[in-house]
């Protein structure tokens, strides 16, 4: 169980009601009060209508993911009440638009009716901003004093938007005060935020990580749930000389341009969802053949094909690990939350340049779009250098074979260097070859790089261990499932060792063997149908988990449900 | 240009796609980038964006830019990306042994069209002009002097330059005899107009002989100036 008090607020409305923004602002206010927060955003593939739902769980101790059971539900429309009233806890309350009261009769006892639209019009604000009235109501019913609320709102909104939203929040607060609305039985503790933590979602986190490793170019074609990586970096690029972003005609253009940019000497990354990455397969293979440093940020959503565009999934692990036709080394790392996404972005870019291999930072919708309290410490990033060419008077050979397989890099524009890059099999100078001995030699050269990386793998955090490290019951998981598992861990009835796999390729077989060998029960938990991590464990380590808990309904795992399932197995 | 000192050899980059045209990467002792089939233009756009000081040219063919890679060609033209694209136009897929292409004449008999192709050929110059290219020209490989002049003009043009080089495939579609008398140079004073309407009309003209020369040239902000 949680040692600290734990709360969850849901905010629901239709697409176009500013539900995501309302969630983010509330999360920022709670963050200022010293709470850990985790915000998820559930939405259909629509721009207007449908049901959009932000949900924030917060506590003074770390929150790994949000829970279903609600303490407060803020409903901008009646559909939200119908969909979520059963999730209300015993002491929970619903703050709902007054004009929908008739439709919410059954839960009248728990309802706080508020004339959102009227209070918004009074401030001459746009209707989409009416959720800020709710911020004021929320502050009142949780015992946040008026002046403190004003301070929180001021710190949580962009400067240009503060005045309007402050007015709305004040209006809401005063309304609740005048109506002597019953305070919610649990009051919030009013702490201060004195550290460098911030609220960031996975996509922004990976963008920041890439920037921390001196990203120069980001090229992407929009696709849910990856688009906001480009949005974030495009905005950053406005004020930065050293960063450019391009939205090209399609994904194939994006990756081919990116290989061109890297050839010219600039540090480049691309971003897409798994369907878009499917389009990029040939060029990913080209990056491997041409030994081009390139980072692909790839976010999973349920497939196949168009699938469930705004859902989450872990159904593409094997696809990503085996991307690109032909055999060539690559790096695939699956962070488990926004903080890890930051460090992974930075590391992938550095290692791509160090080994001249393409790398994938593997995310999913849940990780990309959920925002949480994170601490980014750029000084914790150890930067790795690329091998560059020193003009030794000998002709430059772009693919010169070396002891570690990594060729010295020179870029076009360098005097005395003729830089030949190609998609054909080639000799050391980059001229096409069909000679069998050379074909073998060049493939061996490229794989030498994987051998070196495998030797170095223990230097990196290829997996993380939590829970009881001496337990013989083991739960193994990857990606955003981390959040649900670590929350579920708070409810487990027996000691369990929890292993999060981060590096998917190369696979840290030595460490996996070490950590798994004495387990008597191994439970694999993932969001796909075929238990793809199990496949990898069997292939690489010849280890088979004894049980699996799988879910592939396009939604993330629920921590309380997951705890019940794990407990049923380990009882 | 290197001989004239207007270009440093290390600043020249040639991309090529896949096709007989692509073999040029192995023959030139300069920076080359042999891309995937259809992607030479996209690659070039990336290289130029990464280092705008480079002089980037593209060698491409029927399949590379009018089948597989047409999308990238049109967008690069729209972007007015500062590269020079040289189309080795031979109306056949040579490297894959002689199939019809989108540029082949209607009725072309090849391994995939044994009874003759059904399509009217696309008009490369019309297509790139309509997409925003700011330098459009045609030359014939049999005339080395003119081809050199036009390639140089394309490479010095600031913006998206496209040159259709009629270059018969001697193995699969040898039209050298035909072309000896089927082309003529446009009068010098009518070349390089910046009147788009006139240029479009000229490239669409059904004339007795195929006109050679620079059809259109104008100055517009480039992709690199605006984005990079």
Image (cartoon, coloured by chain):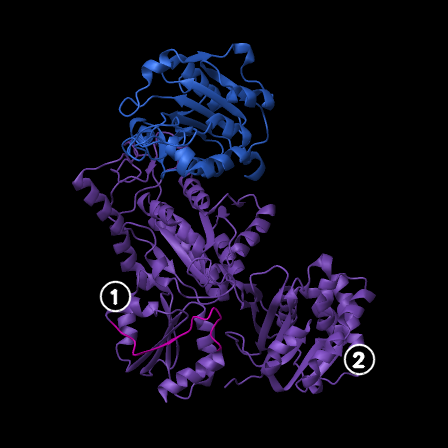
- Does dot 1 land on a helix, a strand or a loop? helix
Q: Which residue is mark 1?
A: A539
Q: Pick whichever, A16 or A190, lies toward us.
A: A16
The CA span between labels 1 and 2 is 63 Å
Q: Secondary structure at mark 2?
A: helix
Confirm whether residue A33 shows in the render. Answer: no
Question: Would residue A479 appear left or right of A65 to someone viewing this image?
Answer: left
Image x and y of residue A104, in percent? 69, 80
> Residue A177's mark?
2
Q: Tell which subunit mark 1 falls on.
A: A
Numbered marks: total: 2
User: Main structural element of the magenta stretch: helix, strand or loop?
Assistant: loop
Tell me the residue at 46%/24% (across/down).
Answer: B155
Q: Is residue B29 magenta?
A: no
Please give the letter of the chain rendered in blue: B
Q: In the displayed structure, would residue A186 be above or below residue B35?
A: below
Q: Nearer the viewer, mark 1 or mark 2?
A: 1
Mark 1 or mark 2: which comes first in sequence? 2
Residue A413: horizontal and vertical position, in percent? 41, 32
x, y percentage for residue A567?
A: 40, 86
Which chain does the purple colour mark? A
Q: Quadrant of residue B189?
A: top right
Q: Identify the mark at residue A186; answer none if there is no mark.
A: none
Q: Residue furthest left?
A: A437
Which range is magenta?
A543-558
């Amino acid at each position: 169980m949680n040692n600290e008090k734990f709360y969850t607020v849901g905010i629901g409305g239709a697409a176009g009601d500013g539900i995501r923004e309302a969630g983010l602002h509330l999360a920022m206010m709670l963050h200022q009060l010293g709470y850990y927060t985790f915000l998820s955003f559930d939405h259909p593939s629509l721009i207007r209508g449908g049901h959009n739902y932000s949900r924030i769980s917060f506590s003074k101790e770390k929150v790994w993911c949000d829970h279903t059971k609600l303490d407060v539900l803020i409903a901008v429309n009646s559909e939200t009440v119908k969909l979520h009233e059963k999730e209300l806890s015993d002491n929970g309350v619903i703050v709902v638009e007054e004009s929908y009261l008739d439709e919410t009769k059954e839960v009248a006892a728990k309802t706080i009716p508020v004339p959102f639209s009227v209070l918004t019009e009074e401030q001459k604000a746009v209707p989409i901003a009416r959720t800020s009235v709710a911020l004021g109501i929320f502050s009142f019913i949780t015992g946040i004093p008026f002046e403190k609320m004003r301070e929180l709102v001021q710190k949580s909104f962009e400067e240009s938007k503060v005045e309007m939203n402050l007015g709305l929040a004040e209006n809401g607060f005063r309304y609740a005060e005048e109506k002597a609305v019953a305070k919610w039985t649990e009051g919030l503790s009013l702490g201060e935020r004195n550290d460098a933590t911030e609220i960031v979602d996975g996509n922004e986190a990976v963008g920041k990580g890439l920037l921390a490793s001196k990203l120069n170019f980001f090229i992407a074609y929009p696709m849910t749930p990856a688009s906001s990586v480009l949005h974030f970096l495009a905005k950053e690029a406005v004020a930065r000389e050293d960063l450019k972003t391009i939205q090209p005609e399609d994904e194939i253009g994006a990756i081919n341009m990116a290989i061109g940019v890297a050839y010219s000497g600039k540090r480049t990354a691309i971003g897409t969802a798994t369907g878009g990455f499917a389009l990029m397969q040939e060029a990913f293979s080209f990056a491997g053949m041409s030994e081009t440093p390139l980072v692909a940020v790839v976010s999973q959503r349920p497939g196949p094909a168009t699938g469930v565009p705004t859902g989450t999934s872990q159904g593409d692990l094997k696809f990503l690990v085996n991307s690109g036709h032909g055999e060539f080394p690559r790096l695939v790392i699956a962070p488990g939350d926004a903080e890890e996404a930051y460090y992974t972005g930075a590391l992938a870019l550095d290692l791509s340049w160090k080994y001249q291999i393409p790398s994938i930072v593997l995310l999913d919708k849940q990780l990309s779009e959920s925002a949480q309290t994170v601490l980014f410490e750029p000084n914790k990033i150890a930067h790795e250098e690329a091998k560059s060419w020193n003009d030794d008077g000998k002709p430059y050979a772009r693919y010169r074979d070396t002891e570690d397989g990594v060729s010295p890099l020179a870029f076009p524009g360098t005097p005395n260097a003729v830089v030949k890059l190609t998609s054909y099999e080639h000799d050391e100078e980059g001229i096409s070859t069909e000679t069998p001995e050379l074909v073998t030699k060049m493939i061996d050269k490229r794989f030498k790089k994987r051998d070196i990386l495998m030797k170095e793998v223990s230097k990196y955090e290829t997996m993380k261990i939590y829970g009881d490290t001496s337990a013989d019951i083991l739960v193994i998981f990857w990606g955003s499932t981390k959040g649900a598992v670590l929350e579920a861990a708070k409810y487990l009835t027996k000691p369990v060792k929890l292993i999060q796999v981060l590096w998917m390729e190369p696979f840290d077989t030595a460490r996996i063997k070490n950590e798994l060998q004495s387990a008597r029960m191994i439970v694999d938990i993932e969001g796909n149908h075929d238990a793809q991590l199990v496949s990898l464990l069997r292939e690489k380590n010849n280890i088979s988990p004894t049980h699996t808990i799988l879910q592939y309904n396009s939604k993330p795992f629920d921590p309380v449900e997951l705890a019940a399932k794990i407990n049923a197995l380990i009882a | 240009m290197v001989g004239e000192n207007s270009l440093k050899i290390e600043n020249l980059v040639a991309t090529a796609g896949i096709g007989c045209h692509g073999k040029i990467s192995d023959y030139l002792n300069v920076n080359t980038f042999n891309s995937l089939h259809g992607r030479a233009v996209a690659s070039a756009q990336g290289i130029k964006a990464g280092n705008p000081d480079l002089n980037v040219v593209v060698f491409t063919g029927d399949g590379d830019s009018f089948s597989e890679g047409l999308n990238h060609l049109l967008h690069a033209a729209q972007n007015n990306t500062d590269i020079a694209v040289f189309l080795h136009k031979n109306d056949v897929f040579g490297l894959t042994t002689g199939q019809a292409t989108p540029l082949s004449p209607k009725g072309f008999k090849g391994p995939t069209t044994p009874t003759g192709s059904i399509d009217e050929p696309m008009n490369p110059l019309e297509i790139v002009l309509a997409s925003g290219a700011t330098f459009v020209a045609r030359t014939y490989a049999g005339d080395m002097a003119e081809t050199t002049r036009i390639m140089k003009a394309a490479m010095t043009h600031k913006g998206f330059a496209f040159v259709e080089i009629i270059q018969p495939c001697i193995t699969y579609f040898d039209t050298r005899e035909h072309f000896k008398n089927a082309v003529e140079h446009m009068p010098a004073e009518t070349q390089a107009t910046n009147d788009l309407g006139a240029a479009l009309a000229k490239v669409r003209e059904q004339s007795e002989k195929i006109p050679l020369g620079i059809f259109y040239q104008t100055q517009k902000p480039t992709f690199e100036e605006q984005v990079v």
